[in-house]
Amino acid sequence: MAYNRNKVILYGAVGIILALTVIAFIPTRTETHITTGVNLNAIPGYGIQIIKISEDSSQITHLVLYIQSIEAQMPDGEWATITQTGEQWDIRQEVEKIIPIDPDINGYSKVRLNIATNSTVTLGDGQEVQFGVPSIPIMVDLMESHNNTGTEIRLLLSQGTGSNYMLPNLQIELSTSKLTAEIIDQ
C-alpha cells in the first residue's frame, strides 16, 4: 500500500495543531484537593481498622456506628438474629456497648454485626464527613461459647495501635482496635 506524502504531512500537521489546542484551552488545576473521608474495615479474627485521609489535621471526635442487627452462628452453621434494635455506638466515646439480646437463642460461639451505611463521623471542628462502612458484616468471636441464658451482649473495643502520617498537604490517620464480645446476664 502506497502512502500519499501530502496526506501524511497534512494529517500530521492537523494532529499537532489539535494537540496544542487541547493543551492550551483545557483548564488544568495545579493543586489536587482531597475530600476528607473515613473508612471502617474489618480485620478478620481481630477487630476493626479506621482510616482517615484529609488535608487538615482535625481529629475524629465522634464515630457513630448504627448497628442494624446482631446475628449468632448456630452449631449447624446457620445464622440466627439475636437482636434487631438499631443501636448506636460511638466508638470514639465508648469503648464498651451493652445491647439486649434474645435469651432464647443459645449454643453459639460467634456473632456478626450488621452496620448501617448511614453511620456518621464528626471531626473536632464539627464537620461531618463521608464514612465508608463495609457492606459485609463484622464477625466477632465470643470470649466463651454461649450455652446458658444471657440477656445482653457486651461489645468491647480494646486498645489497639494508632499512627499518623503527615505528608505535604495530606494527613493519614490509621488506627486498629481489637473487638471482642461476651454474653452477660443482667
Image (cartoon, rainbow, N blue to C red):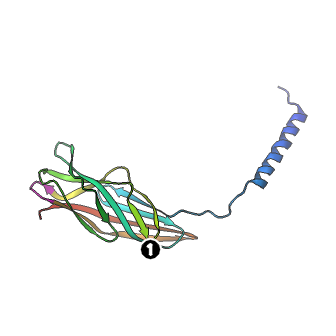
User: SS for tag 1?
Assistant: loop
Quadrant containing the N terminus in the rendered view: top right
Residue 56, image x and y in percent?
52, 71
Going by the image, does 26 lie left or right of 36? right
Look at the magenta stretch and give its main secondary structure. loop
Which class describes the residues within 10 Å of circle 1: few (<14), some (14-19), or many (20+)?
Answer: few
Front residue of this view, candidates 25 and 128: 128
Front residue of this view, candidates 118 and 60: 118
Front residue of this view, candidates 117 and 18: 117
Which residue is rendered at x = 11% and y = 51% of the image? Answer: 104
Residue 73, image x and y in percent?
21, 48
* Residue type, label 1: Gly
**Stretch of the chain drawn in magenta:** 145-151
Tell me, yes or no, whether the highlighted magenta stretch contains residue 180. Answer: no
Label total for image: 1
Q: In the picture shown, does residue 156 fall above or below 85?
A: below
Which residue is rendered at x = 80% and y = 46% of the image? Answer: 18
Going by the image, does 61 lie left or right of 11? left
Going by the image, does 43 lie left or right of 131? left
Residue occupied by mark 1: 124
Q: Quadrant of residue 151?
A: bottom left
Which residue is rendered at x = 36% and y = 69% of the image? Answer: 161
Q: In the picture shown, does residue 114 fall above or below 176?
A: above
